[in-house]
């Protein structure tokens, strides 16, 4: 089982937040993507709702946002060099640069690193309940299917309608919990996206002000 944290732990964004992983064996990637054909009649009796969710894509997304975090943290890691340069040089331009670095760029990089972490944790936090629900539903379908096909079902009639109804209601409740988890993760991702947009707008504004004052800036692809 993969451990996941929904809430983003407190930190300054400088790398003190733990890495996020979502690693599953390759042989498991397609196990929970579709309901096997022989279980479809059982799934209908259980009123199984099957989330459309490609679990095998999550590891790449998590690693991609880790790269984003790493890039944000890499720029902030230059802070000792910046501080040394500021202390070794005097003048209004250097004071302005020091202010920009400490009060603006540093803050924006922290926001980006925190947002990247928030998206990582949200992806893992939503993947786990969906996968666990699918595992539970498949086990339940296999259980009922096995009882229906059992030699003894000829004598005892197999699972009753009441058995199916009770398990269908149980699945419905668990599916509701999955929907809640999905909504929570979507809300967390949207909040992180807003944080990224704010940081991006701040950086664009700073770059425009630099260029308006005759300070050339390198083109940054974000």
Image (spheres, rainbow, N blue to C red):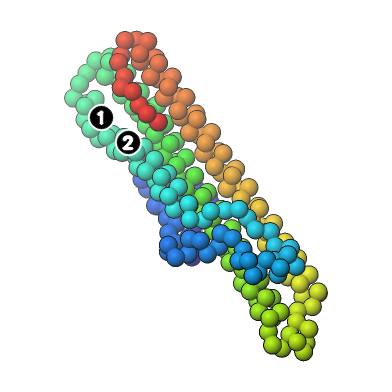
Q: Crowding at label 1, few (<14), some or many (≥20) Cα neighbours within 10 Å?
A: some
Of 126 and 85, nearer the camera is 126
Where disc 2 sits, the SS reads helix
Q: CA distance from mark 1 to mark 2?
A: 10 Å
Q: Residue at x 45, y 24 (%)?
A: 202
Position of residue 168 relative to residue 211, above or below, is below
Q: Earlier in the sequence, mark 1 or mark 2?
A: 2
- Residue sitting farthest toward the top: 213
Residue designated by label 1: 82
Residue for point 24% across, 15% down: 91
- Residue 208 figure quarter: top left
- Quarter-wise, where is residue 129 in the image? bottom right
At 78% from the left edge and 70% from the top edge, which residue is drawn?
165
Classify mark 1: helix, strand or loop.
helix
Q: Is residue 171 visible?
A: no
| 163 relative to 37, above or below | below
Left or right: 214 in relation to 169: left
For label 2, the residue is 76
């Amino acid at each position: 089982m993969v451990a996941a944290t929904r809430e983003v732990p407190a930190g300054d964004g400088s790398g003190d937040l733990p890495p996020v992983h979502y690693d599953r064996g390759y042989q498991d990637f397609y196990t929970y993507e579709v309901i096997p054909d022989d279980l479809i009649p059982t799934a209908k009796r259980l009123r199984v709702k099957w989330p459309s969710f490609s679990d095998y894509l999550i590891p790449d997304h998590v690693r991609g946002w880790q790269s984003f975090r790493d890039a944000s943290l890499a720029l902030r890691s230059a802070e000792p060099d910046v501080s040394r340069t500021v202390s070794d040089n005097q003048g209004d331009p250097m004071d302005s640069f020091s202010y920009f670095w400490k009060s603006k760029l540093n803050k924006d990089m922290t926001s980006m690193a925190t947002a990247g972490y928030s998206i990582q944790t949200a992806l893992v936090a939503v993947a786990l309940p969906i996968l666990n629900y699918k595992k539970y539903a498949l086990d339940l379908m296999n259980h009922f299917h096995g009882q229906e096909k059992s030699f003894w079902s000829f004598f005892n009639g197999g699972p009753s309608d009441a058995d199916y109804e009770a398990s269908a209601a149980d699945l419905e409740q668990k599916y509701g919990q999955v929907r809640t988890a999905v909504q929570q993760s979507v809300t967390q991702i949207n909040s992180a996206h807003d944080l990224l947009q704010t940081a991006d707008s701040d950086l664009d504004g700073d770059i425009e002000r630099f260029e308006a004052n005759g300070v050339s800036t390198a083109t940054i692809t974000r």
